[in-house]
Amino acid sequence: MKQKKLWNLCICLLTTVSLCLAACGSTSEQKTEAVSSAETTVASTAQSGDTGSSTEITATVDSESTEEEIDIIPAESEYAYSLIVSINPECELYFDAHDVVVGFAYLNEDAKTAYYQPEYTWIGLFLEDSITQLITAADKACFIKEEPAVKIELASVTDGNAVTDSSMLDRAEAAITKTLVPETSEASDESSGSGDTGSAQDNTGTSSTGTTTDTAVVPVIEKTVNEEVKEEYKIKVMITCPTCGGAGIWCDLCHNTGTGTCTHCGGTGVGCPDCGGTGKVNCFGCNGQGSYSCKACGGAGRYTCKVCGGGGMMGDQVCNGCGGSGRVSCNNCGGSGRETCNHCHGSGKETCEYCGGTNTCKFCRGSGTHPCDSCGGTPGTCTTCNGAGEIEQE
């Protein structure tokens, strides 16, 4: 009997414990549901525009998680180097070892404004094409000024074998210049004059590169290398030698032209010393007189009458040949005693044989210059660049 009571008591205790545990579990679930319901309510309230209850929640939200990811930044193993191009928009382009874009990053809001457009695709473009598109997009977004300053920086390098120098900066510079400064060639002149406006510019009034065709803007381009990259890979940025302008030769006197001003004509190229600048010289046949003594009459203009022998009379009659004077006029010179010069036809002048009547300086042959007295027409090696035509950017 006692055992039966004890067993019943154990059963009651077990039942009581089970009910308590069940109650605790139900309460915990209710609390969890209540908390979830409260968070949902607060979130809904924040979305509904109740600024009073949404202030604290907004402060704890990570703003970056709400922005659209528009940059594609590859891992270091996926690119060889990157270039940062800064106008006002600043963009970083990542290239593989074949100079193909494998990633990009818009570094400021202006870059997003200019480059984050549906018509621009960066991945897969070669270096020159990507730079051309970048400059065209910046111009279209009105970031290209009258004299734009463009900075190109070799920002990072992950493959030292692919990047041994700064040639990619030179290629980027060439692409920028070509985009902003239209080429003037005979072919373009012919196409513009033929009336085929469709090939010269599009419907927006821009050239094939995207820049306006009214005026060309000449960019001021600065090429740099990140200091850490420069130090690690020993990369030098070369610029055109300011002394010789890239020619590699120089002369202080003629300034690399190889010529000097003709001192005889003052650089005009005219003033023949033989003719005194007139283009004419005295006729050598008559010494500038236009005529010379008649050879028939010796300059007398008259000679003894051959009919009467100079007596003037034929017997008792006056000589009909000389009219009684005993002398007759020279038929060769007409009595003047001088013959007209056949060489100059009486002008006394003839065309200067040296300058041909053009009044060209015989010392410089009309060029106004002569070989430089210092270098003899061949400038020596430029000492600034040692003939290389370029120097390292300081």
Image: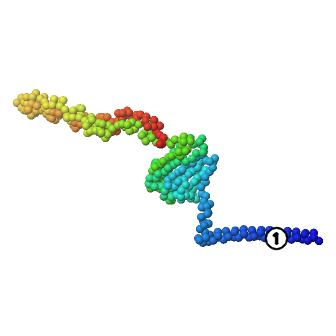
Q: Is residue 370 left or right of residue 125?
A: left
Q: Is residue 382 left or right of residue 289?
A: right
In the image, what residue occupies the spot 5% across and 30% down? 316
Circle 1: is it few (<14), some (14-19), or many (20+) Cα within 10 Å?
few
| Of 160 and 175, the residue lying toward us | 160
Q: Residue 171: image x %, image y %? A: 52, 46
Image quadrant in which you'd find residue 234: top right
Residue 147 visible? The answer is: yes
Q: Check the image and report above or below for 221 versus 302.
A: below
Q: Residue 221: image x %, image y %? A: 47, 48
The residue labelled by disc 1 is 19
| Of 246 and 328, the residue lying toward us | 246
| Of 264 and 71, the residue lying toward us | 71
Image quadrant in which you'd find residue 55: bottom right
In the image, what residue occupies the spot 41% across and 34% down? 380
In the image, what residue occupies the spot 60% across and 57% down? 70
Q: Residue 76: image x %, image y %? A: 62, 48
| Of 220 and 281, the residue lying toward us | 220
Furthest residue in direction left, as rendered: 316
Furthest residue in direction top, as rendered: 309
Element type at mark 1: helix
Q: Check the image and report above or below for 101 versus 382.
A: below
In the image, what residue occupies the spot 10% across and 33% down? 322
Quadrant of the image for the N terminus?
bottom right
Q: Is residue 282 left or right of residue 70?
A: left
- What amino acid is labelled 1 in the image? Leu
Q: Is residue 27 left or right of residue 258?
A: right
Furthest residue in direction front, as rendered: 2
Residue 195 visible? The answer is: no
Q: Residue 235: image x %, image y %? A: 54, 41
